[in-house]
Amino acid sequence: MGSEGGGGGGRSENVQQSSRFVATWIVGGVVLGLSVLGLRFALPKKKKRPIRVYMDGCFDMMHYGHCNALRQARALGDQLVVGVVSDAEIIANKGPPVTPLHERMIMVGAVKWVDEVISDAPYAITEEFMRKLFDEYNIDYIIHGDDPCLLPDGTDAYALAKKVGRYKQIKRTEGVSSTDIVGRMLLCVRERTTVDSPSHASLQRQFSHGHSQKSDDGGAGSDTRVSHFLPTSRRIVQFSNSKGAGPDARIVYIDGAFDLFHAGHVEILRLARGLGDFLLVGIHTDQTVSANRGGHRPIMNLHERSLSVLACRYADEVIIGAPGEVSKDMITTFNISLVVHGTVAEDNDFQKETGNPYAVPISMGIFQVLDSPLDITTSTIIRRIVSNHEAYQKRNEKKAASEKRYYEGKSYVSGD
């Protein structure tokens, strides 16, 4: 009897254990199934779309102020799309450009913060073009500096973008403008001219805002424009690349003045960069440039020229104040594998029999002359200004009149 009762209790206990086991498997299966189901629906989680910002401009005689504006614009998003205004639109709204569209496209496309470039952009953001930016180019915000951009009738070119709440503003870079640079050019040309025509003198006053100053060395006969640019270590760091050359990198070196940084400079840097892993660019001192090209040069000072080169995507690093002569010690210090020079240049020192600044790399068999893609020099840009000075005077007067109407129509706080 006892054994029978014990057997019955055992079977009952086994049944209960089996039931609990089955229940556990069922619950576990349901939980696992729900987990798999949840994972299945969680996997296709939509990837966050990059924020795309748009900035446009004429970018005529592009300088480090333009580059700094593009740097700031890029910081407001993940991708920067830049519209370059057509020659026809510039002529209609401001006067003739100094550099044609194809050169301006090269310049803008070479800036390392630019992801995409749109050619023939309109001067004013029309409703049709704004819709195109939003729908076709997936632009989230339209960017401009805190200085006014005015149409011939004095109205704001970005009024529509502001109205729809898709406008963001950056701070204008003080101390430089295309107008200021033209003034420096014309004042340097005056140094070389014995007689000034009334119209030429008037143009100099218009573009230089009446400020003629003696050169830094105190020369009494000099009347060159002194740059207002004050470099800071922070600005240089903002423009610099964080990554240096690797231990086995093939380092290519090219040097020069790189004054009034233009499309010809960009293209020769592009070719040079393609010959190695790392492009080191030497920027000659103001004194070296003056000694080779006359006291009226350079137009842009050493730090202005350095920032322009640093903003170029083809330059990995610059030597600020590089010596005019490439020495053996310099080649060893920077581990230079190849020294290059373009065929189009202000100076043809690389062809000299004696006093050749590239004598050492030539003797070492590491010097190469590159065919320059564009026949443009700093003198080319200056000649464009001087030959068409009356048109640029009218352009400057139109700009001043337009800004006057703007300031009279509304209260404006400067970014100074």
Image (cartoon, rainbow, N blue to C red):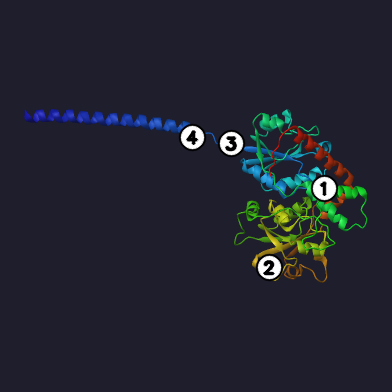
- Neighbor class of circle 4 (other Cα within 10 Å; few <14, some 14-19, many 20+) is few
361 in relation to 205, above or below: below
Classify residue 383 as left or right of residue 405.
right
Q: CA distance from mark 4 to mark 2?
A: 56 Å
Using the image, tell me which numbered label, if any, was put on residue 49.
Answer: 3
Classify residue 349 as left or right of residue 235.
right
Kind of residue indicated by mark 1: Phe
223 in relation to 167, above or below: below
Q: Nearer the viewer, mark 4 or mark 2?
A: 2
Mark earlier in primary sequence (4, 2): 4
Kind of residue indicated by mark 2: Met
Pointer 2 residue: 330
Element under disc 3: loop
Mark earlier in primary sequence (4, 3): 4
Element under disc 4: loop
Element under disc 1: helix
Using the image, tell me which numbered label, if any, was put on residue 43.
Answer: 4
Kind of residue indicated by mark 3: Arg
Kindly check if marks 3 and 2 are in contact, taking CB atoms under 8 A apart as contact. no
Q: CA distance from mark 1 to mark 3?
A: 45 Å
Q: Nearer the viewer, mark 1 or mark 4?
A: 1
Can the viewer see residue 375 in this picture? no
Pointer 1 residue: 207
Mark earlier in primary sequence (2, 1): 1
Mark earlier in primary sequence (1, 4): 4
Q: CA distance from mark 1 to mark 4?
A: 61 Å
